[in-house]
Amino acid sequence: MLTRMLSATAISALTVTAGLAQESDTQALNDLQIILDAMPGADQVSEVSYFDMSSNGQVEALVKMNGNCDQGYCEWKLFAEREDGWQAVGGGLASSVKFEPTEGSGAVINADDITYAYSGAETIYMWGDLLQGQTPQQANNDEYAMVGASTPYDQTSRIRLEKFELDLNGDDVPERIFLIAGLFYKVGQWGTPYAIFDANNELILSGVSTDMPKIFPKSETSGSVVIEVVPAGLRVSEIN
């Protein structure tokens, strides 16, 4: 299992504006180029691609940088044309990042198998994770005992387990994801603990995330990417 950290500065929205909205696409793209030329690290821009992510008639610009790289993970930014001009509405570090068209129209950003959507708001947001829209199951007494014995959350009478079952490593056998719900083990005002067990009742990953972890399937190999949303940024782990 691999784990890496994306800092809060790498994923937070930046604020860059260029006057009023322009009259033509050509003028708008020229204004974006002015912003890119003026920003710190302008000489590190390696590629700019465009896509109308939200199908609203305005393109977004995905900017890749090749100067700020850490162990092969390079900086990227997404710019959108808003009412007061172009703004950077998100970004991060990734070894691979691209627009990924969605069914019908539009696109998401795929950054190392983590997908982000943009719908015209101030920032991008993660979209399409495996737990999105899932209804939790009720854990049984044996599962409460297993979680209590294998994690620090041993006061099982004071928690509520919310269980999800997903095949996370491609072996057609589901793993069990437990959210440790309730106030007793909640971390501050933001964090919900979780624990993931394999079919043999072995703990394979645990942590804390805002609301719940985000889980994305890997696109080229079997396995999953598990994202913890924490105050410092994103903690990224892989299950193979």
Image: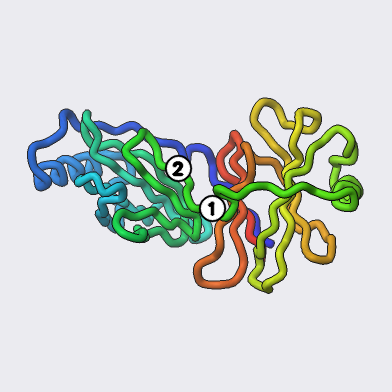
Dot 1 surroundings within 10 Å: few (below 14), some, or many (20 or more)? some
Dot 2 surroundings within 10 Å: few (below 14), some, or many (20 or more)? some
For the residue marked with disc 2, what is the amino acid? Tyr
Q: Which mark is residue 203?
A: none
Disc 2 on helix, strand or loop? strand
Q: Position of residue 135 (x, y in %)?
A: 64, 47
Marks counted in the figure total 2
Classify the position of the C terminus by image quarter. bottom right
Left/right placement of residue 165 relative to residue 235 reads right
Left/right placement of residue 106 relative to residue 231 reads left
Disc 1 on helix, strand or loop? loop
- In this view, 136 is above or below 14: below
User: Which is nearer the eye, 53 or 137?
Assistant: 137
Q: Which mark is residue 129?
A: 1
Identified at 45% across, 42% down, the residue is: 125
The residue identified by callout 2 is 125
Left/right placement of residue 115 relative to residue 27 reads right
Q: Position of residue 175 (x, y in %)?
A: 72, 61
| Camera sees residue 133 | yes
Q: Nearer the viewer, mark 2 or mark 1?
A: 1
Q: Position of residue 98 (x, y in %)?
A: 37, 59
Residue at the extreme top of the image, as rendered:
189
Identified at 34% across, 41% down, the residue is: 119
Classify the position of the N terminus by image quarter. bottom right
